[in-house]
Amino acid sequence: MFERIRAFFDARKVSRWSLYFVHKHEGLTYALHDDAVDILLGYVLAPIKIGKRISPDWELHLNFNFEHKSIRLVEAFFVKGDISSTLRDLIATLDPGWMVPRGELVFVDTRTRKQLPLETPDPSRRRDDKDAHVTLASVMRKVIY
C-alpha cells in the first residue's frame, strides 16, 4: 500500500504543462515545465507583444502532460498584446482546471535531460561546462527573434 501511495506522489512531480521547443531538423530540443500554463505562455507572449516573430526554424508546442496532448503555438494566438480567446478555449478543453498556482519553472535539454539555467549565469563564476552558455534566455532569442 505504501508503495502505491509513493508512486502516486512521484507521478505528481511531473509538471502539469510543458512548452516544447521543436527544431525543424533536430526535433524536440528543449522543454520548459511549470504547473501554471499562463507562466509558460508569458515567455512567448512577451517578445511577440513587442513585434518579434517565431523563427521558421522552430515550432513551439504547449503540452498538457497529464494526457500528453499538445497545441502548436502560432503568432495568431497572441494578438493585441494578449492571449487569444481561441487559445484559452483550447487550453480549457484539454485542462478544465488549468488556472492553477505557479509551480517550479524548470528548463531542460530534452536530448540529455540536463536541467539548464533560466538566465545567463554570473560571468564571475566561471564554468567549464560546455552547455553553460545555453539558457532559456539564449534559446528564446533564437526561437523568437
Image: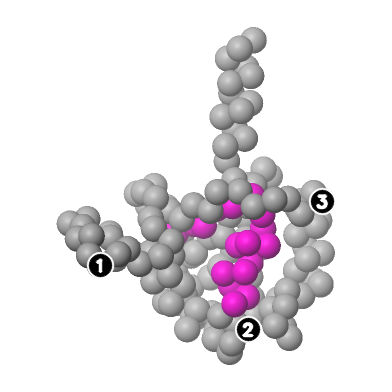
Tell us which disc is closer to us: 3 or 1.
1
Residue 13: where, in percent of width, then height?
57, 37
In front: mark 1 or mark 2? 1
Q: CA distance from mark 2 to mark 3?
A: 26 Å
| Residue 119: % across, % down | 40, 65
Magenta range? 29-46
Q: Earlier in the sequence, mark 1 or mark 2?
A: 2
Q: Nearer the viewer, residue 121 or 82?
A: 121
Residue hosting label 3: 96
Q: Secondary structure at mark 1?
A: loop
Compared with residue 87, is residue 101 higher up or lower down, i.e. above or below? Answer: above
Element carrying mark 3: loop
Instruction: Say which residue appears at 63% left-offset and 26% top-offset.
Output: 8
Name the kind of residue labelled 3 in the image: Pro
Residue to which mark 2 is pinned: 49
Could you tell whether 65 is left or right of 91 in the image? left
Give how far apart the Cα atoms at labels 3 and 1 are.
43 Å
In space, the residues marked 1 and 2 are separated at their CA atoms by 30 Å
- Compared to residue 7, the image places residue 12 above or below, namely below
Q: Quadrant of the N terminus?
A: top right
